Amino acid sequence: MNISNMVNEWAFHIHLIMAISWIGGSIFMFVLGITLRDKKAQQEVYPHIGPIFGWFEVVALIALLSSGFILGFHYNLFEVLMNGGDTKIVHALRMKVMLVSVLTVATVIHFVIAYKTNGKERTRTEQILSRSSSMLIFFLNLFVMHYAIVMRDIL
């Protein structure tokens, strides 16, 4: 096995493990958010879980984006994206890239607000942005996963 194939194999495994972690963590935090309704309980739980989860998610996102770029080059997906016409793989790739871009922006917004306000009272705007970005991240994850499965089936 040459070094290029080994890097691509590792990139695929890292991408898969980080995607599982990212989506699983997102689902856990979503369930926690809708079930933990008591304000006092939230103030006891989130300041402890939030920073750990947040930094893990930053690392996972960087690993996902990096391994995604490696896989994109390995499978010539960037060339396909630019010159592939109107095929199923191009449609799935465009959708995934668009969703991941929005997901990344939503994650940065959510992380900055959460980091800045950890253990503090949020303004109404911060609260709305934090909750809406969190909800957006949750739902976008499901769509990104769908298009990843579509792409894997095609490749």
Image (cartoon, helix red, strand yellow):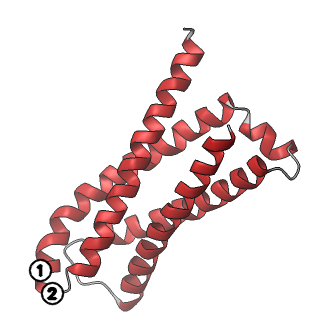
What amino acid type should be assigned to the residue bearing mark 2? Asp
Residue most toward the top? 1
Amino acid type, callout 1: Ala
**Outermost front residue:** 153
In the foreground, 15 or 127: 15
Residue that carries the numbered disc 2 in the rendered image: 38
Q: Residue at x 63, y 43 (%)?
A: 153
Left or right of 72 on screen, residue 30: left
Tell me the quadrant of the picture where the N terminus can be found: top right
For the residues labelled 1 and 2, say whether their Cβ atoms are less than 8 Å apart: yes
As drawn, the label of residue 52 is none
Percent x, y for residue 143?
A: 56, 63
Residue 84, horizontal then vertical, whole percent:
85, 44
Local packing at callout 1 (Cα closer than 10 Å; few below 14, some 14-19, many 20+) is few
Determine which of the numbered discs, if any, sits on residue 41 in the image: 1
Q: Residue at x 14, y 71 (%)?
A: 45
Residue 116 visible from this viewpoint: no
Question: Is 50 rendered above or below residue 151?
Answer: below
* SS label for mark 2: loop
Q: Is residue 40 visible?
A: yes
**The C terminus, quarter of image:** top right
27, above or below 82, in the image: below
Q: In the image, residue 124 lies at what x, y percent?
A: 37, 91
Q: Image quarter for residue 4?
A: top right
**In this view, 57 is above or below 42:** above
> Which residue does the image show at 32% across and 58% down from the upper left?
25
Residue 69 is left or right of residue 122, and the answer is: right
| Quadrant of res 26 | bottom left
